[in-house]
Image (cartoon, helix red, strand yellow):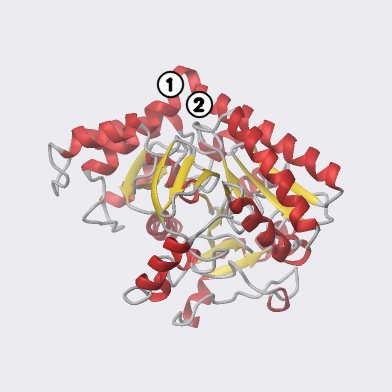
């Protein structure tokens, strides 16, 4: 029987000096409880009790090259020995910026920060300055950071959503001020008809449409075939900007991000997570004429923006992802597809309604009778999250680590051997959950 005794001891100790023993609320409710980890390499992470797991959490997505990738660590070590923070410019900034401009369809210029949450703020400020408008259209279930003015409707209970045609904006935390609700319009995702209706009524007020191009945080929901193109068309017709928050999708769904994969180019986009192979950095990218407002009347600042460590990590990670004409992505697509096929075969054999959807590098598992989850309302109403939580713990006991909310991430370090071990563990875990 697996033991988590040392993790529990450290959690009890941590609670004496850290609220809840965790430094992010996302980790507070993890099943069976928040574990502590000692080391990680490749696709394997090891906890403080010595238990090893095939890791599909991957640091919530950033570890696209796997843990402790030598090219990234070596690049950071070399760079940091020359200095960590200059409060001035250095060549690595240019190197990473040039890579982003080369790789990302909408990127003509870029600015760096430390997190997706932070750069979301810069994107909204810039969009409002460019258009002279204040309202931003956003979508139910999309997460754009934890800051006061954006933490809205990320996990709203079904009885508080309001009518589908006119959802209710809801604060998500104590301490937020209701004044921010007036800055946004809200709709369900993937419903272009409702977006068209809203633009017909209020398009002249909308500064930007802000969207995850694929709903990775909630259900790994892909865009409907015409949805993103429809958003692009409506923004063009009404003088609004299309802003894609690619904090998760950027460099995970492909070397050109979701915008490259889905063939829709936004005006602005933000990237983070997978961009630097596990180190903290983020980027705001967009059209040159828009981005040049940052040199005039739109403020964007930050002590650690473009720091040496982050830029060295990003340069190395991007080089690895580009290597051999994108061999990393071909590998991840093959491994992810094999795992998805294996999960679907097991679900059929066990006779359980286990839906797999998304893309090979980021997909979602849910117990549901639906054939597809198309928006947040589907996710919140029709997915058995309690049953999935039991499956998550059963997998953990068998050496497979996944996130409670159902999304699985693939890295370049995962192999067919990991897939085989995972399918065997899932087979056993499903039997346990079915018998509970």
Q: Nearer the viewer, residue 247 or 163?
A: 247
Q: Position of residue 229 (x, y in %)?
A: 65, 42
Q: As drawn, is 382 to the left or to the right of 360? A: right
Q: CA distance from mark 2 to mark 1?
A: 7 Å
Dot 2: within a 10 Å radius of its alpha carbon, few (fewer than 14), some, or many (20 or more) residues?
many
Is residue 50 shown left or right of residue 305? right
Q: Which mark is residue 411?
A: none
Q: Position of residue 286 (x, y in %)?
A: 42, 43
Which residue is depicted at the point 50% across and 23% down? 326
Assign a secondary structure to mark 1.
helix
Can residue 400 be seen here? The reply is yes
Residue at the (56%, 56%) spot, across then down: 209
How far from the left and from the top, in percent, is residue 329? 54, 28
Element at badge 2? helix
Marks 2 & 1, CB-CB < 8 Å contact: yes
Residue to which mark 2 is pinned: 328
Q: What residue is shown at x 69% (from left), y 39% (from top)?
A: 423
Q: Which mark is residue 323?
A: 1
Q: Is residue 273 above or below residue 101?
A: below
């Amino acid at each position: 029987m697996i033991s988590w005794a040392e993790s529990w001891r450290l959690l009890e100790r941590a609670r004496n000096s850290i609220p809840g023993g965790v430094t992010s609320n996302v980790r507070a409710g993890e099943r069976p409880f928040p574990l502590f980890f000692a080391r990680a390499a490749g696709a394997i992470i090891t906890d403080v009790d010595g238990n090893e797991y095939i890791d599909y959490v991957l640091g919530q997505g950033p570890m696209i090259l796997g843990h402790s990738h030598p090219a990234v660590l070596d690049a950071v070590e070399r760079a940091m020995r020359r200095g960590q923070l200059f409060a001035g410019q250095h060549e690595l900034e240019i190197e990473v910026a040039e890579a982003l401009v080369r790789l990302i369809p909408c990127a003509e210029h870029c600015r760096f920060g430390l997190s997706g949450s932070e750069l979301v703020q810069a994107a909204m400020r810039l969009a409002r300055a460019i258009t002279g408008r204040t309202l931003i259209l956003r979508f139910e279930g999309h997460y754009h950071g934890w800051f006061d003015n954006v933490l809205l409707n990320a996990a709203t209970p079904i009885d508080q959503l309001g009518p589908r045609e006119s959802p209710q904006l809801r604060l998500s935390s104590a301490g937020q001020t209701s004044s921010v609700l007036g800055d946004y319009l809200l709709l369900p995702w993937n419903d272009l008809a409702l977006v068209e209706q809203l633009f017909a009524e209020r398009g002249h007020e909308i500064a930007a449409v802000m969207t995850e191009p694929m709903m990775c945080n909630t259900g790994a929901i892909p865009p409907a075939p015409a949805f993103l193109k429809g958003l692009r068309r409506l923004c063009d017709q009404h003088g609004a900007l299309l802003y894609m928050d690619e904090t998760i999708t950027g460099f995970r769904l492909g070397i050109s991000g979701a915008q490259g994969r889905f063939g829709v180019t936004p005006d602005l986009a933000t990237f983070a997570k997978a961009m630097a192979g596990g180190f903290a950095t983020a980027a705001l990218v967009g059209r040159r004429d828009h981005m040049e407002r940052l040199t005039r009347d739109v403020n964007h600042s930050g002590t650690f923006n473009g720091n040496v460590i982050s830029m060295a990590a990003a340069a190395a990670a991007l080089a690895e992802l580009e290597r051999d004409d994108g061999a990393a992505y071909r590998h991840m697509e093959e491994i992810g597809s094999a795992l998805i096929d294996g999960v679907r075969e097991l679900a059929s054999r066990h006779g359980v309604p286990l839906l797999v959807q998304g893309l090979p590098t980021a997909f979602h598992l849910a117990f549901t009778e639906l054939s597809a989850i198309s928006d947040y309302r589907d996710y919140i109403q029709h997915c058995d999250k309690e049953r999935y939580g039991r499956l998550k713990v059963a997998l953990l006991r068998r050496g497979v680590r996944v996130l409670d909310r159902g999304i699985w991430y693939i890295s370049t370090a995962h192999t067919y051997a990991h897939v085989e071990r995972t399918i065997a563990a899932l087979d056993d875990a499903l039997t346990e959950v079915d018998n509970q």
